Amino acid sequence: MQLSLFDISQPKIELDELFQAYFECRKNKRNTANAIAFEIDYENNLVQLCEEINSGTYKIGRSIAFIVDKPVKREIFAADFRDRVVHHLIIGKLNQLFEKQFIYDSYSCRTGKGTHFGIQRIDKFIRQCSMNYTKDCYLLKLDLQGFFMSINKSILFTKLEQFIKEKYNETDKDLIIKLCKQVIFNDPTKNCIIKGNKSDWDYLPQTKSLFHSKPNCGLPIGNLTSQVFANFYMDSFDHFVKHDLKKRYYSRYVDDFVIMHEDKEYLKKLIPKLSEYLQTELQVTIHPKKIYLQHYSKGVKFLGTVILPNRIYIADRTKGNFYNAIEKQNQIARDHKPTKEEQQSFQSSMNSYLGIMKHYKSYKLRKHMINKNLSGWWWNYVYLSGGIAKFEMKTRII
């Protein structure tokens, strides 16, 4: 029997680890064409994938590129399903180490630290900084220009390779480093499949497209690894702000970050320091048109909400996007009988908005928007539970 691929003397990825990554991956992707094709013979497909990884013959497949308009116009690259399994394998191996490294107040793509958590932390910081709204407190909110497309791959990989060598103690360390390198330096624009029309890219700023990114720069939006690696990329900046600059009231969600201080002029003078670090160490730039510096009483928009003293509102853009999402689902219902996949897409889309809105004083708003705008046809398939908090699918499909 030939054992070259699974020689026990050589560090390797275990097959059961790949199965675990597969089951994590398919939770939200079971109805895509790639997922279905893979699942038909998933056991043999995973065995083959495991052999390729351990023998060094694994190659990344083609991505599907398309444009989404909501919540903002973005370019998405959907990796082939087997590559997504590899992404889950990598993150499953490294995530616990990342969690030990990350500061408490970075919120993107972390268990228990989603949008709602980030909003509540900003609200808490405002109350603390203003001494429960009795003293002056100013908020500096910044974001980065074309962040994902600006990430320098060499900087990212150098940081990640050093991190893995220092923190990761498993025998498959070299294999994980190699997989990370493949994922980071892969260019999904090469030989990708365009879904939709090329005109979909009209009016998308070049700073938001991998097709126009600088050489050796840019991570594809849509991959789990991109989200987590982007957070890791910004980690040194987080520590710079929290520990070197000693800023207690600092929060970051992807490339949006907020710093609070009782002195407005101090925050103004802080901007060049932040900009210099970001440009020198990470080669990313603060968006010059998205610098917000105001007294806390003016409120701040953050993650689809407006945070004001003693109250948090749903932002107008979130309301508009929710309305547009309802209209999109209504068009499907008017055009044809929705497929099972379209019904599940309806449920996912609607619940994503309700999941954000239910945390705040929005009961009347949710009730009004759904009762006034949602096509009555959908009630054949779904019902609301939890006080207009969640759409559930009816057991019996009409």
Image: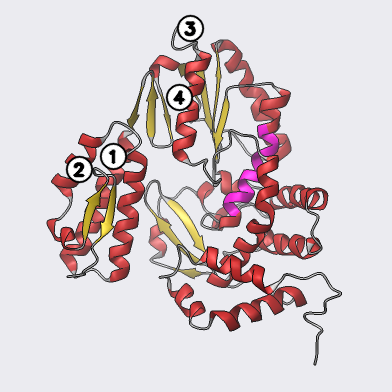
Vertical position of residue 178 compared to residue 61: above or below? above
Separation of residues labelled 4 and 2 (CA atoms)? 26 Å
Badge 2 density bin: few <14, some 14–19, many ≥20, Cα 10 Å = some
Mark 3 and mark 4: Cα distance apart in space: 15 Å
**Sequence-wise, which precedes: disc 3 or disc 4?**
4
Q: Which residues are magenta?
A: 226-238
Q: Which circle's residue, 2 or 1, is located before the other in the chain? A: 1
Q: Which residue is mark 1?
A: 319
Q: Which image quarter: residue 321? A: top left
Residue 99, how many percent across, how many down? Answer: 65, 44
Location of mark 2 (residue):
369
**Drawn side of residue 301 relative to residue 22, left or right:** left
Report the residue marked by disc 3: 135
Q: Is residue 229 magenta?
A: yes
| Disc nearer the start of the sequence (4/2) | 4
Looking at the picture, tell me which residue is in the foreground, 269 or 168: 168
